[in-house]
Amino acid sequence: MDLDGVVRLGDAPLPGAVETLARLRAAGKELRLLTNDPRPTRHELLRRLAELGVEFVLDEIVTCGWATAARLRAAGCESVFVLGSAGLTTELRHMGIAVVTSPSEPAEAVVVGCDENLTYSDLDEAVGRIRRGAWFVATNADTSFPGPTGPRPATGAVLAAVEAAADRGPHVVGKPHPPMFRAAVEGLSEGSQAVVVGDSPHSDVLGAHQQGLRAILVSTEPVDFPSRRDFRIPDARIADLSGLLDPEVVIRRWQHPEFSWPDTVRAGVAAVVFDEAGDVLLQRRADNGMWGLPSGHVEPAETVEEAVTREVFEETGLRVRVTGLIGVYSEPESQSFVYPSGRVSHFVTSCFRCRVVEGTPGAHGAETLEAAFFSPDALPTGLLPMHPRWLDDARVGRWAAHIR
Ligand SMILES: [Mg+2]
């Protein structure tokens, strides 16, 4: 379970928390307490919770700072440069990892946590080390936390500065990223089932669902997301922790959809180009070796028609003209792509029928291994899974029949 907003709010336990935790323990439930605050050590947090009257033991506490140290140790990392609190540094040292402070000492990783005494030269040092090849790790990516006069900059704000100058993205440990949840379920009894309890659909529910765990949202307000496949929809909602003991509360079974949760939604285009014989133009992609329709994404200020003619030329060397729209495809199951960086884009792709103006097809540019016309009845093997349907729609004009 999440700490802030579930067990405590500020310096006070939330209604029902203390009694519910005691009853869960009495019922033999194993508990893990999660927090994305990288600053305190687990020992410090344990003391603060005891002052609130909430008793936990050390192995039940999963801070993102401690989880980062555990992740680094599991990866065999022995030395780090840290932008973070004294608490984070302590957790790293407890894990047997050397924390270097002098610019002359090498470090295998740069760890970014929430550093309240950050200086320009700290940023400079971190960026230089990442650019020279150090592993870039972040305790969490939350951009702000609530303060008395409004949001205050958190780890994610420092991370954005380092990321911008280093031109590289971090490996993030904290919620909603997987390492935090893996750290939480590690060591639970064999065969036990876990459920995540949190107050944030974007952090707790999304993170749980990405890991295949069920999630209960603590909220007095119902949540509403437009798609029923949204990973942020909880499997149950309770007003406070005592709801965990309410026999009326039913937890839905979470089924992981067949796509990865997208970071962005982007505009895409694809072309179905027939020659006079009715054969269709396909290109074999350099990134995955698969055959597909010429396709790509829309650049700033481009119309979709401009984008599709540009993509066909860049990938096959053919000049084409758009003659009609076949359909607009957006199913996340087939239209979400995971890039090597780990980022996921969900494409909304307009697919156009085009005719050749001039040229003969061939490999043209770095994205294409080969390009050629194929009979629709004898398509090559290793075709991108969604393209046969688009091709079919182009031939019989029935895109609208698929709309759900
Ligand atoms: Mg919370």
Image (spheres, grey):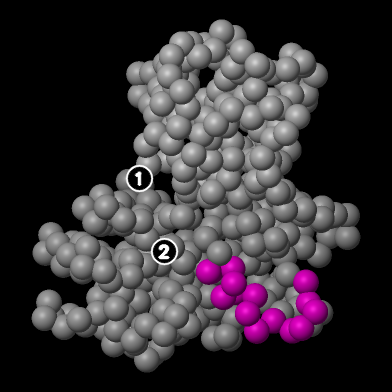
- Residue at the disc numbered 1: 150
Q: Which residues are magenta?
A: 179-193
Label 1: how many Cα within 10 Å (few below 14, some 14–19, many 20+): few
Q: Left or right: where does residue 227 sit relative to residue 77?
A: right
Q: Left or right: where does residue 149 sit relative to residue 372?
A: left
The x and y percentages for residue 182 are 59, 72
Q: Quadrant of residue 325?
A: top right
Report the front residue among 129 and 156: 129
Q: Left or right: where does residue 311 sit relative to residue 323?
A: left
Residue 255, placed above or below residue 4: above
Whether label 1 touches label 2, CB < 8 Å: no
Label 2: how many Cα within 10 Å (few below 14, some 14–19, many 20+): some
Q: Tell me what residue is drawn at x 46 percent, y 70 percent.
A: 64
Q: Tell me what residue is drawn at x 61 percent, y 18 percent.
A: 274
The x and y percentages for residue 88 are 35, 76
- Residue at the disc numbered 2: 171
Hey, what amino acid is under mark 2?
His
Q: CA distance from mark 1 to mark 2?
A: 28 Å
Image quadrant in which the N terminus is located: bottom right
> Does the beta carbon at disc 1 come under 8 Å from ligand 1?
no
In magenta stretch: residue 281: no
Hey, what amino acid is under mark 1?
Gly
Secondary-structure class at tag 2: strand
The x and y percentages for residue 28 are 79, 82
